[in-house]
């Protein structure tokens, strides 16, 4: 969660990071952004759950045996995906 929170300080699209243990929710500042971010993450090989009951939130649920290297790679992917989504949204602003 600390890594995701640090990413949130660089991206205005991230409103909050919360969770317990390895179940983490990332809330975005705008509706439907989670869907766009997940699309960018999937392009890079990382899958997360999009919550249909709240279009601002995605869920990160890694396996209990996740390694530090895998966490670091996932954080790189999330950072790039949020950045690319912000760039795409800026084109339409």
Image (cartoon, helix red, strand yellow):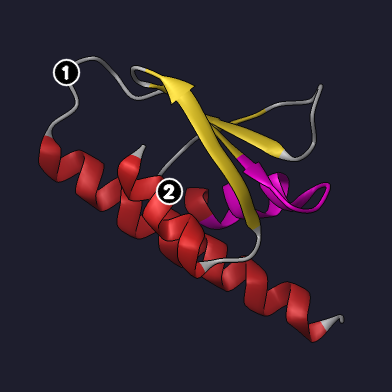
Can you say whether 51 is above or below 26 in the image? above
Left or right, 43 with respect to 37, comes to left
Residue 39 in magenta? yes
Tell me how far mark 2 sits from mark 1, CA to CA: 22 Å
The magenta-colored residue range is 27-40
Can you say whether 2 is above or below 8 in the image? above
The residue located at (78%, 85%) in the rendering is 91
Residue 33 place in picture, x, y as percent:
73, 52
Q: Is residue 44 visible?
A: no
The N terminus: image quadrant: top left
Question: Is 38 or 27 nearer to us in this picture?
Answer: 27
Q: Does dot 2 land on a helix, a strand or a loop?
A: helix
Q: Residues within 10 Å of mark 2 (few under 14, many from 20)?
A: some
Q: Earlier in the sequence, mark 2 or mark 1?
A: 2
The residue located at (61%, 35%) in the rendering is 58
Question: Is 29 or 37 nearer to us in this picture?
Answer: 29
Left or right, 58 with respect to 64, comes to right
Which one is closest to the eye, mark 2 or mark 1?
A: 2
Q: Are marks 2 and 1 in contact (CB under 8 Å)?
A: no
Which mark is on residue 9?
none
Residue 79 place in picture, x, y as percent:
43, 61
| Residue bearing the label numbered 2 | 5
| Residue bearing the label numbered 1 | 65
The residue located at (65%, 71%) in the rendering is 86
Residue 13 place in picture, x, y as percent:
66, 60
The residue located at (21%, 49%) in the rendering is 72
């Amino acid at each position: 969660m600390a890594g995701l929170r640090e990413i949130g300080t660089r991206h205005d699209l991230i409103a909050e990071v919360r969770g317990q243990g390895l179940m983490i929710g990332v809330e975005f500042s705008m509706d439907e952004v989670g869907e766009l971010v997940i699309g960018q993450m999937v392009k890079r090989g990382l899958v997360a759950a999009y919550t249909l009951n709240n279009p601002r939130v995605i869920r990160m649920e890694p396996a209990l045996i996740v390694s530090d290297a895998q966490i670091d790679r996932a954080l790189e992917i999330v950072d790039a995906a949020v950045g690319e989504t912000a760039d795409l949204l800026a084109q339409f602003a």
